[in-house]
Amino acid sequence: MSPESAPQQRGLRGIARSWFRRGVQVSGILWRHGFGVYLTRMGLGRFRPKRVEGEPDARMASLELPVRLRLACEEIGPVTIKLGQALASRPDLIPIDYAREFRKLQGDVPPFSWDEARKTIEGETGAPISDVFERLEQAPVASASIGQVHLGVLRGGQRVAVKVRRPNIEQTVETDLQILSFAAREAERHIKGLRTYRVSEWVDEFARTLKAELNFRTEGHNTDRLREVVAADEHVTVPRVFWEHSSSRVLILERMDGVHTDDAEGLADLGVSRSVVAARLAESVLRQILIEGFFHADPHPGNVLVQGGGRLVFLDCGNVGRMDRQMRESMVRLLSASLDDDALEVYDQIIDIGTVADNTDLQQLRRDVQRLMGQYGGVPTAQIGLGEALEELMKLIFRHKIAMPAVFSSVFRAMILTEGTCRHLSPDFDFRGPALRVAKESLQDWFRPSNLLRGIWRSLRDLQRYGMLIPRQVSEVLAQMQVAGVTLRLDPDERDVIMHRADEMVNRLASALIIAAMIVGSSVMLASERATRLLSTPGAIAYVVIGALLGLYLLYSILISKRS
C-alpha cells in the first residue's frame, strides 16, 4: 500500500465501521417494533444485535404495520422522521395508508440536558448566559428531532425563544443520508420501475433540504423572507430574528404568544371564530404558494399559533418551498381548471408542468383525468376532502410515469396539512372558497400594466437570446454531423424552395422583433402619466396605430401560412 493511499483506506474503513454500527442500531429498533421477520427475509438478519432491548410486546404486535413503522421512524432519528414526512406527500412511492400515517410524524423527541444546551449557547454567542440574557429558562418548552426551544429575556428586555441544535447531530445525519443515498441508487439499479420516479434524485434533493435545516442561519433567512411575504396581511405575522446572537447552531427569535390551532380550550378562551381562522389560514398559505412563490411547507398545528382577534403566527420556517413565476402561473391554471371542472385544461397543465416519459399513453392519461374530474368535480371539499382528491391526482400522475418537479411534492404537502388544520378548526370547512378568491387575486395580478410590461420585456429578451443562439447551435450540429461522417444531399429542384423558406423565416423573425419593440413602446406610452399629452400629437397616434396594424398583419400572415 502506498503512503498516499493509506489515509484513504483508513477513511473508507472508518465509514464502513460507522455504517455497520448505525445499521446494527437501526436494525435493533426495527426488531423491537416487530420488523425482524422482514429484515431476515431481506438477508439483513446478521445485523441484529446480540442483545435487543425490549422485544416486541403484545401491545406492539397488536398495532398495524404503518403505525409501527411510524413509531420506529420517530425512534431512529431526524433523518427517518423527515424522510417519513417527505414520503407522506408521495402516495405514488408508498401505499396510501402509510402516507397518511406518516403525516402524523411531528418529530417530538425527549429533550437533551440543560448542561449541553448551555454549553452550545455560550459557545455560539461567545459569552456567558448571564451576559446575553436577563433570564433563560432551563426547561425547554418544545423538543424536536433537530433542536429544542428555551424561553428567555435578552439584556435589552426583548422576550425571545432560543432554539438550540442537538449536540453531535451532524455526524448521525450525515451517516444516515449516506446510507439512504446508497440504498436509493442500489434500488434503482435492481428495480427498473424506480428509475421512472427518479428516486435517487429525489433522495438527493431531500438530503440537501435536510442539511439546510441543520443550519439555523438558513432557517433565520427563511423566517425573514416569510415575514416580508406576509407583511401586507394584517391578520398574519412571523417572528423576527435577533441576528446579533444567532448562528448556525443557535437561533434567537422574537417570542410570540398564542394558542395552537388544535387547542380547543385555548381558542374558546380567545373568543375567536374558528371558521374565520380556518379561512385566513387557507388563504394565507395559498397566497404564499400561488402569488408570492415562497411558502411555509410544513404548516401543521404545532407550527401555527392563533392570537387575539384571530391573528395567525407561522413558526419554524426551516422547511419552505420556492416557485418561480412560470411554475406559479402553471399552478394557478391547474387549480383554476380543477375548480372549474375543466378536465382538458387540467390535462394540459399536467403535461406542461411535468416531464412525460416516452412510453406514456397520453390518450389514456386524458381519459383518466376526465374520469377523476367526473368523480370529484363540483363536489364541495367539505364532503370529500382536498387531501383525498390530491392523493388521487398524484397517483394518477405517477401511474402514467410523469415526473413532476420536486417543489410539487412540497406544494402537495403544504395544502394537505393546511386543509387538515382547517378541517380540525371547522369540520364543514370548504377549501374551494379560499382557493377561488386567491386564484382570482392571482389572475388580476397578472394583468396589471406593470406586470404585462415585464412579461413582454422578458419575452423580447428571450427572443433575442434564442435568436442569437440559433446560428451557433446550427453550426455546432453541422460540425458534429461532419465529424460523424453524415452527409446531407439536397435536390437542386428543392434547394431554391428551401432557401426561400429559410429567407422567409429570418425575415419574419426580424419583423417580429421590430413590431414587438413598437408594441412595447406603445404600451409604455399608454402606461405613462403623460399618455394623454403624448396621444394628442399626430406622430404618437400614428406610431401606436402602425405598430398595432403591423402586429395584426404579422399574425394574419402566420395563420395564412399554417393553412397553406
Image (tube, rainbow, N blue to C red):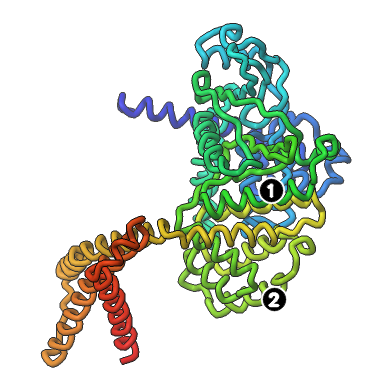
Residue 185 visible in image: no
Q: Position of residue 31 (x, y in %)?
A: 74, 39
Seen in the picture, residue 307 relative to 482 is either above or below; the reply is above
* Residue lying at 42% horizontally and 60% vertically, measured from the top left: 449
* Residue lying at 48% horizontally and 67% vertically, measured from the top left: 352
How many numbered tags mark residues here? 2
Q: Residue furthest right?
A: 58
SS class, disc 1: helix
Q: Position of residue 326 (x, y in %)?
A: 45, 59
Seen in the picture, residue 117 relative to 525 is either above or below; the reply is above
What amino acid is labelled 2 in the image? Answer: Gly
Q: Residue furthest left?
A: 492
Q: Which residue is mark 1?
A: 280
Q: Quadrant of the C terminus?
A: bottom left
Q: Which residue is mark 2?
A: 374
Q: Is residue 69 left or right of residue 22?
A: right
Q: Is residue 478 left or right of residue 19?
A: left
Q: Quadrant of the N terminus?
A: top left
Residue sitting nearer the eye, 17 or 102: 102
Q: Are marks 1 and 2 in contact (CB under 8 Å)?
A: no
The label number, if any, that marks residue 525 in the structure image: none
Mark 1 surroundings within 10 Å by alpha-carbon count, few (fewer than 14), some (14 through 19), many (20 or more): many
Q: Is residue 502 left or right of residue 211?
A: left
